[in-house]
Amino acid sequence: MKLTPRLRTVIVLVGFAVVFTGLCVKSYRQKSATWDEPQHALRGILGWRGDHRMDPEHPPFLRLWAALPVAFTPSVKLDTELIDKVSPADWVGNVQFQYARHFLYKVNDADSILYRERFMIVLLGVLLGCLLFAWINEWLGFWPAVVALMLYGLEPNIMAHASLVTTDFGATCFMFGTLYFLWRSAPPQKVRATAAPRLLQRGFTIFNTVGAITFFTLAMVSKFTTVLLIPAIIILLALTAYRQANRRRALAIAAGIFSGMLATTWFAMWAAYGFRYAPSANPHWLFQFQQGSPFGDHVPFIARLAVWADDYKLLPNACTQGFLLGQIKAQARGAYLFGEISSTGWWYYFPVAFLLKTPAVLLVFIAGGLTVMFAKWRKLLNTPVYILLPSLIIVGISMTQKLNIGLRHILPVYPLMLMVAAIAAAWLIRRNWRVAIGCLAAAIALLAVEVRRAYPSPLAFFNVFVGGPQNGDKYLVDSNLDWGQELKGLKRWMDSNEVKHIHLCYFGSADPAYYGIQYTPLPGNGFMDAGKLPTEPGYVAISATNLRGVYFTEQLRQFYAPLLKQKPVRRIGYSILIYRVDRPWWQ
């Protein structure tokens, strides 16, 4: 039986959804919470109960989405009266981390909550894959779309963040959806897709307009850094209007679409915070970071803007002040690159991180796609501008920032680069179909082999150019490698080696005791435990981020420095290093 175009598309997308979901679920069930996940997991549950005081640095939508399966479960225990007793300034420090940890590990079942919330992010991973396929199918044809979807399904950075309860992946999905529907609003070009003609209509149709506004709004109420999308949208809308036959009418429509985006976002932001100005039912508990602290001195313009918005109650207090807090925290943060530590980062951090953590096969595809794209430079203002302009804005602005803690901050570039990779695939297919099949099959196989070295720890992936994930901590740490996710792996190693007790210096906010780990906390073991010197002989387990001393004082860095010269007994998920200690190394 000959497959119809619609049926083969359904088969491809269903197959992708099953495989991608299976890979993500298998991976996340073997991982403990990453550093930020307890806060994010609790934030959504609190939000559904009308409390928006937890982690105000991001809008609430994605956390509300993730918490849907657990927010209304009677077994989930939660006491918000404790928050009322803490000042807002103290709350946004370590207190909220401690509260989230207590909620998740002491009074509830952490894995039960995390598994269900993580699955909701996996669903967004499936949605993004479908959007990627749809765009490339319409633009380049079915088989390049299939190749891009396979690259997407195996891309370790996509897989890692689609398996975590954070804001990074959802924002990536919604930003890409916005660009897709903006592209569909452009004047009709040659169409290669085989979907229903009604859905393939290009231009300022109701379908495309509603799609662009919807995804833009979802992006804005998910993560504050999605404002990076606004300059690209303005330029792309203007370009789209300019290329229409009736430019004046098209410019008016484009201006109306952008105005609709802003108006819908304003309404949706209030809706996400429950149409209430105060972060909770307590009207006296308000964030005011610009008062009585040096916070406002770091970003004076944003501080004044937040005060002005609060004075007129233009947006919820947690929204304006959360944005201000995020900007303040971004001014200085410990960062690590190639063995060096800095509090203000490096301008080249993100390009380097991209080159280190992107699979070699995908880098080759991207290089090939860029070559083909620029060889046809006269067509750059067609589809390529919808790919290159947002990518350049996201990476360019990120390179000017001082927050260098993870490749995840430029994650929205990845689906766009997969579109560039699809150009290379399309070029091969058009030149010689039989040769293309062999080359593409070999490339996908090589990608699978490379990614398999890190799986089920895709967060720790580093490409073969730097020797794989076992060398990762020489170049990058924190959310690039070690984000607190390997306590389960540590417990499995202890059980298989009959190790009853371990000395632990852990970088994360999960509770080792929840996983049955008997341990003595070492100096620098986070804000949860008071550190002690190890007794020997015995085993010492230390997170790679702590071993490199990113967030430590110089004295504490020197304390652990001798371990860098020793060979670890085992690397747990490339994140936690285990050493056998028979004598004090610090003497």
Image (tube, helix red, strand yellow):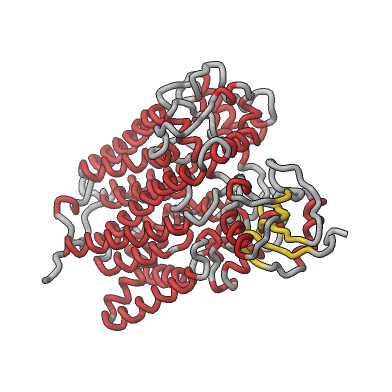
Q: Position of residue 501 (x, y in %)?
A: 70, 55
Residue found farthest to the left: 1
**Residue at left offset 56%, top offset 73%:** 465
Residue found farthest to the top: 284
Q: Nearer the viewer, residue 67 or 540?
A: 540
**Residue at left offset 38%, top offset 38%:** 68
Q: Which corner quadrant of the image does residue 89 belong to?
A: top right
Q: Is residue 342 visible?
A: no
Q: Nearer the viewer, residue 239 or 389?
A: 389
Q: Nearer the viewer, residue 469 or 187?
A: 469
Q: Position of residue 182 (x, y in %)?
A: 31, 48
Q: Position of residue 354 (x, y in %)?
A: 53, 62
Q: Which corner quadrant of the image does residue 299 belong to?
A: top right
Q: Position of residue 375 (x, y in %)?
A: 37, 71
Residue 468 vs residue 18: left or right? right
Residue 581 vs residue 21: left or right? right
Classify 11 as above or below 261.
below
Residue 246 vs residue 555: left or right? left
Q: Is residue 485 visible?
A: yes
**Residue at left offset 63%, top offset 68%:** 471
Residue found farthest to the bottom: 435
Of the 4 image quadrants, the one containing the N terminus is bottom left
Of the 4 image quadrants, the one containing the C terminus is bottom right
